[in-house]
Image (tube, grey):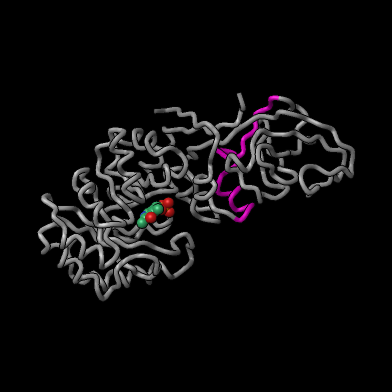
Amino acid sequence: MRPARALIDLNALRHNYRLARELSGAKALAVVKADAYGHGATRCAQALEGEADGFAVACIEEALELRAAGISRPILLLEGFFEASELALIEQHRLLCVVHSAWQVEAIERSALSKPLTIWLKLDSGMHRVGLHPAEYRDAYQRLLSSGKVEKVVLMSHFARADELDCPRSAEQLVVFEQARGDLQAEVSLRNSPAILGWPSVPSDWVRPGIMLYGASPFEQAQEQAARLQPVMTLESKIISVRELPAGEPVGYGARFVSERPTRVGIVAMGYADGYPRHAPTGTPVMVDGQLTRLIGRVSMDMLSVDLTDVPGAGLGSRVELWGRNVLASDLAQACGSIPYQLFCNLKRVPRLYSGG
Ligand SMILES: *Cc1c(COP(=O)(O)O)cnc(C)c1O
């Protein structure tokens, strides 16, 4: 059997969820959209079902998958509904629903719901992606509550630059939020992972941790609270071939690496078809038999090459960690101009093996 696999530590997932709650002192919706950032939405939700205040997903298809797997906690649709016809399913499966646009307010007013919904009303406080304009916000709130179709509204917004700890933009967005809200008395939800870890003074009744649940830091630089996260996924494989090259020999497609010295090359069963980033450059950290070494040459579809010259004990069958507790996904992402979010979401083909379930 091909040795490439992703080990998923559900105890670490629970640790990170508890940290989100502890740091915020708030209720926390575990964000498990996009198949729990590649970690497996059903398994992750089941591991948290006993303690999570609820879950958040991108769309109704993802919510229905969780309901079908027996998840009964609240589930929030982060983009609400895409068509008014989804409202019947939202009611039937007791889903919480974001409203980010005027057409959604109108669709709810016109709907034939028999049980009132809980709506998370999203304000565009400066990210300019989705959300109601500040001037429309209070009116939308009142219309929803007087429609007879809504029993509760949570006030929500999203930060564009919370991962930049010295950036004033989050504080500016908070001012826009407070002004738009005025005297509306309702629960508030503003914080994603970087805001939970790095912006402790932002008020919240509910927080929405995503990437931090999976143990990866959203920050480019070291950060005290992020250092407390436990990586959930270890992407690992084995050395399947070894060769000794004299100086001056090319390795892999395009001869992007040429040995500077006599070099022992290990070939690892892992490639870009598994989700390892193809653009990772020579020098990217890789761990072999517990020792850090470097990727060399271009990443192929099914294989990649590592430098074993300074890991003399390593050879055929040696264990290789591509990311995990030793090679942090956030460090690897930075080495290749990506973010840990994308590395995790790109995971494909490798079997996921769970522990701590
Ligand atoms: C994805 C998402 C989150 C989670 O963001 P992280 O940075 O992964 O914590 C929170 N809120 C909204 C609206 C999202 O779309």
Residue drawn at x 49%, y 46% as measured from the top left: 345
Whether residue 170 can be seen here: yes
Left-right relation of 144 to 216: left
Q: Which residues are magenta?
A: 317-337
* Residue 325 part of the magenta segment: yes
Residue 102 image point, x, y percent: 25, 68
Give the image quarter of residue 315.
Answer: top right
Q: Quadrant of the C terminus?
A: top left
Q: Quadrant of ligand 1?
A: bottom left
Residue 167 image point, x, y percent: 47, 68
Residue 21 image point, x, y percent: 33, 46
Q: Nearer the viewer, residue 69 or 321?
A: 69
Residue drawn at x 45%, y 42% as measured from the top left: 214
* Residue 322 part of the magenta segment: yes
Q: Nearer the viewer, residue 169 or 199?
A: 169
Picture layout, residue 259 above or below residue 268 = below
Q: Quadrant of the N terminus?
A: top right
